[in-house]
Image: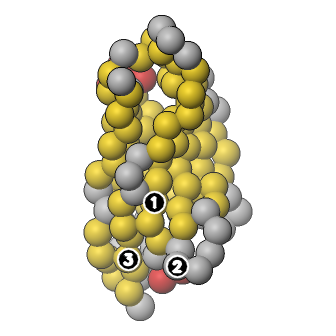
Amino acid sequence: QVQVVESGGGSVQAGGSLRLSCAASGSILRINDMSWYRQAPGKQRELVAAITNKGRTNYADSVKGRFTISRDNAKSTVYLQMNSLKPEDTAVYYCNADILTSRNRNTYWGQGTQVTVSS
């Protein structure tokens, strides 16, 4: 059984910062790509940032220069440091992990964490 759990969301004023964490646990052999997505009310879920298990990253244009994704492979954890937050960053943020277990390889989603940025 694999679990992916996010933490670190909250409310902040525009220009502020938040750090999200996402930890995977269970019978994990290897974690491949880890990603952060977000979904604002009435909008489709979109990719915010992704990182490979070698540390290669990519970002949505809307967050480049403001957000930083990183991971600690020893802790099976991925982070999203969000700086210079804008009201349009308000959304539920979801962690996604491509995980290999002894039984199969699957993509797992966290339950989501709310980020609210006020102007």
Earlier along the polypeptide chain: callout 3 or callout 2? 2
The answer to whether residue 105 is visible is yes
Earlier along the polypeptide chain: callout 2 or callout 1? 2
For the N terminus, the image quarter is top left
Where is residue 43 shown, x and y percent of the image?
Answer: 62, 75
Residue 42, above or below 74? below
Name which quarter of the figure residue 118 lies in: bottom left
Residue 51, above or below 81? above
Amino acid carrying mark 2 in the image = Pro
Where is residue 113 shown, x and y percent of the image?
Answer: 36, 60
Residue named by callout 1 = 93
User: How far apart, in angstroms, are the residues tagged by discs 1 and 3?
Assistant: 10 Å
Question: Which label sits on residue 116?
Answer: 3
Earlier along the polypeptide chain: callout 1 or callout 3? 1
Residue named by callout 2 = 41
Q: Residues within 10 Å of mark 2 (few under 14, many from 20)?
A: few
Marks 3 and 2 close (CB-CB < 8 Å):
no
User: How far apart, in angstroms, are the residues tagged by discs 2 and 1?
Assistant: 12 Å
Is disc 3 placed on a helix, strand or loop?
strand
Amino acid carrying mark 3 in the image = Thr
Residue found at x 63% / y 55%: 47
Question: Which label sits on residue 70?
Answer: none
Amino acid carrying mark 1 in the image = Tyr
Q: Residues within 10 Å of mark 1 (few under 14, many from 20)?
A: many
Residue found at x 59% / y 80%: 42
User: How far apart, in angstroms, are the residues tagged by discs 3 and 2?
Assistant: 12 Å
Is disc 1 placed on a helix, strand or loop?
strand
Where is residue 66 shown, x and y percent of the image?
Answer: 53, 63
